[in-house]
Each structure stands twice: as structure tokens, then as C-alpha cells.
Amino acid sequence: MKFVNTVLAVFSTRIIEKIIRQVNSIIISRSLGPGGLGLYTLFFAFAKNLHTFSEFGLGASGIYFIRRKLSEEKKIIENSILFSIVVGILLSVLVFIFRKQLGSFLLDDQSHFILLLSLVIPMIMIATIFSTLIRGMKKFKIFNLFTIIKPFCFLVFIFIGLIIYNGDVITAIIGQITAILVSGFWIIYKMKILSSFNISFHKKLFYDSFKYGFKQHILKIIMMLLSTSPIYILKVLTSKEIVGQYGIILTLLGIISFLKMSISLVLTPEVSEMKDEEVHLFIAKVARNTLFIIFIISFIASILGPIYINFLYGINFAYASKAFRWFLPGIIFHSICVMLHRDFTARENPVQYKAILAYFFGAVFSILGSYILIYNYSEYPLEALGVSYNLSYLTVLVILTSMFVKDSNLQIRQVFVLNNNDRLLYIEMARSFFKKLKIIDYDKK
């Protein structure tokens, strides 16, 4: 019940966050058009990729070490902030040196966009790792506020900059950087109150964290290649306008998968405290229920999604509304993959290499499949990308399921088919949800 309540709390926050992000997306799309949105999408993807390449799994190892009580929280935090500052500064210098080349390849020679990004890389690293550690400490109220502060600050900035003053892409990027700084300083302040950390280095803990985290780091890089490489392939083979259309599709896929993300954010620290047999059974339960819910949401989205895009984003994004449905099977496969791979990374003796293997084949399929299909079906680039997206995540799902069933000695139907006990989960969720909204007072019945 505690897990369900926490998921509902995170879910409720994610609803607010998604609403704000949707408003942000609509403002940017209508203000900048497909081409401007394409540049912004590339900028944002590159910023996220930089952090993924440089984080080395310290966030994931921090959750594992905190929940398994393998070290003091304060020492984990101190190592994280020192690592973020040092690596962040080095990365900022590299990005600054190669800003012209990066700007030429990604952003139509807009190297000043890359220059602005280089100034906030250390803050991106600190804020992201701290938000992960906050989850490990199970301070979900702070985490929930953090997830809202950043998009809300961005909303205020772009409302003024894009709507009132008719700004352009640089306005949106400055707004994103401002939001990063505000939310970053806020979570540093909250973490300081929680742990009173100092700038210090703990060599043995860093070695142990790196040993665990590096495997997780490889996994995240491969997952990143699977999910974001199509953006760069689209840029090379098509245009920034097509990338902008794809950005709208990604936004809607994010709406569909936000329940999956809410469960996943709570699931990692939850299973990190369990014995292996408990982990297997719990993951299987979460996976089959996630499949059921995401399938229903995807079915509804297949009907309402195109209408939603045409109404809110306008005629300029008509292509996105037509191609959107091609990606729906993939988001279902992806949602189950996210749940299953937690089993391999959160065990008492983690076996990350199995998850790495599954996502590696998916990433290879994604890169090669996206390039080949888009190149050969250039008149339908997003439809071609949708086929590659679906097959890539289906590949990952088949491999993860095979390994999970073998390791856990569970049956496939326990992973994918609801049982009678699952009905109780929905009763608990509904009860908690209505109780939080104070619509129905079950305690008085």
C-alpha cells in the first residue's frame, strides 16, 4: 500500500508537470514553427546526451548504496557533488572548444547556442544526480517539487519572451538555461538542509560506487543511443522541420508513458531493499499491470492523439498527427522493458550485463534500422522511423523477457497476464486516489 501511495503521489505530480510541459510545448511549437522546434529539440537532446555520457552511473549507484545501507548518505552526496563539479567543468571546456563544430553539425551553425549550454553543464550534472539521490533517500515530496519547478520557470520565461516579446529560438534556449539554474540551486539548497554535506572526497566509496555505477553507465549510454540516435539520423537524412515534427510525436509519447515513469521512479529505490525472490515477483506484478494500463492509454491515444495535435499545435504539424500512430506499439514495448530491466540492476548481486546485452541489440537495430528505412522511404521518414522504433523495442523486450523468465523461474503469463490478485491493486489505487482528492471518504464507510 505504501508503494501504491508513493506512486500515486509521484503520478499526481507528474500530471501537473506534464500539463505545464504541454503548455510549454504548445507555446514553443506555435511560436517557432517546425524548423525552430527542430533546432530546439536537437539542442535539448544534445544537452541530455552530454549528461548521460558524463555521469558514470553515480546517481544509480547512489540509490543502490543508500537503500542497501552500504555507506553513509552524506559521503555519497559529497562524492557526487565533487565529481559533478570537476567533470562538469572539464566537459564545459571541451564543449566550448568544439562549439563551432557542434553548432555546424547540429544547429545550422548556431554555435552561440552551444556556448550557452557550456556555461551550465556543471549545474545540469549536480541537479540531475541530486534529484536521483533524493529518490534514493525516499524524499519524494522534494523530488516532486523539483520536477515542477523547472518546467514552471521555463513556462514563465517563454510566456514573456515568446508570446509578449515575440522571441525566437535563442529566447527559448535562454529560458531553458534559466530554468536549469533556478531548479538546480533550489535542489542544492534542499540537499544541504537534509545532509549538511561538505566538498569532500571519499576514495574507497568512490571506487565501489564507480565499480557498480560504470555498468549502469554503459546501460544508460546504450539506452540513450536507442532512444535519441533517430533524432540525429533524421537531421542528417531529412531536415530540421522533420525533426520538429518528430519532436511533437515525442511529446505525445511522453504523455502516454508518464505513468510508466512514475512507477519506475519509485520502483528503483523500492526493489533495492528486497531479496532476489521478492524482486522477481514484484517486478513481474508491476510489469503486467504496466502493460495493461499503457495498452489502454495507447488505445485511447490512437483515437484522440491526431485530434489533439491538430487542435493544439495547428496545421503546421499535420504530418506529426498522421505519423503519430506508427509509434504506439513501441511505447508499449518500451514501458515493459523499463520495468523488467530493473530486476537485473537492483538484485542483491546485480547482473547489469544482461540488461546491457538486451539494449545493445535494440540500439544496433535502432541505428541501422532507422538509417536504412528512412533512407529508402524518404517520402515517409516518420513512418519509417516508427517501424524501426517498434522493432527495436520489441527486440529488447523479447531478450529481457527470456532472461527474466529463466532467472526467476516464473512463467511468461506471470509477466504479461493479469491475475485475480491484481484487481486488489486497482482497488487500492482508486481508494488512495479518491481519498487524496477527498471525493470519497472510504474510512467512514
Image (cartoon, helix red, strand yellow):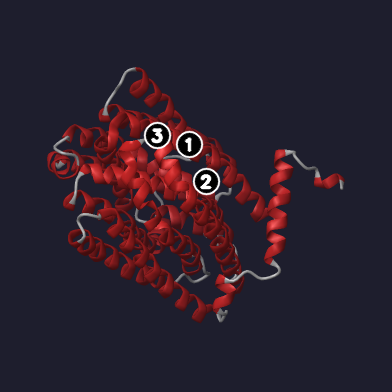
> What amino acid is found at the position of numbered circle 2 in the picture?
Ile
What kind of element bears circle 3?
A: helix
- Res. 224 in view: yes
Residue 394 coordinates in the image, percent (x, y): 40, 69
* CA distance separating discs 2 and 1: 9 Å
What kind of element bears circle 2?
A: helix
Quick check: 102 left or right of 226? left
Mark toward the viewer: 2 or 3? 3
> What amino acid is found at the position of numbered circle 1 in the picture?
Ile
- Nearer to me, 316 or 79: 316
Q: Is residue 259 above or below residue 344?
A: above
Q: Do the residues labelled 2 and 3 touch (CB within 8 Å)?
A: no
Mark 1 Cα within 10 Å, few/some/many (few <14, many 20+)?
many
Sequence-earlier tag: 2 or 1: 2
Quick check: 387 left or right of 136? left
Q: Are marks 2 and 1 in contact (CB under 8 Å)?
A: yes
Sequence-earlier tag: 1 or 3: 3
What kind of element bears circle 1?
A: helix
Q: Residue 278 carries which label?
A: none
Farthest residue in the top direction?
Answer: 165
- Residue at the location (38% across, 55% down)? 203
What residue is shown with label 3? 26
Sequence-earlier tag: 2 or 3: 3
- Residue at the location (52% across, 69% down)? 347
What residue is shown with label 2? 134
What residue is shown with label 1? 187
Quick check: 77 left or right of 321? right
> What amino acid is found at the position of numbered circle 3 in the picture?
Ile
Q: Are marks 1 and 3 in contact (CB under 8 Å)?
A: no
- Residue at the location (49% across, 67% down)? 340
Quick check: 339 left or right of 361? right
Total of numbered circles in the picture?
A: 3
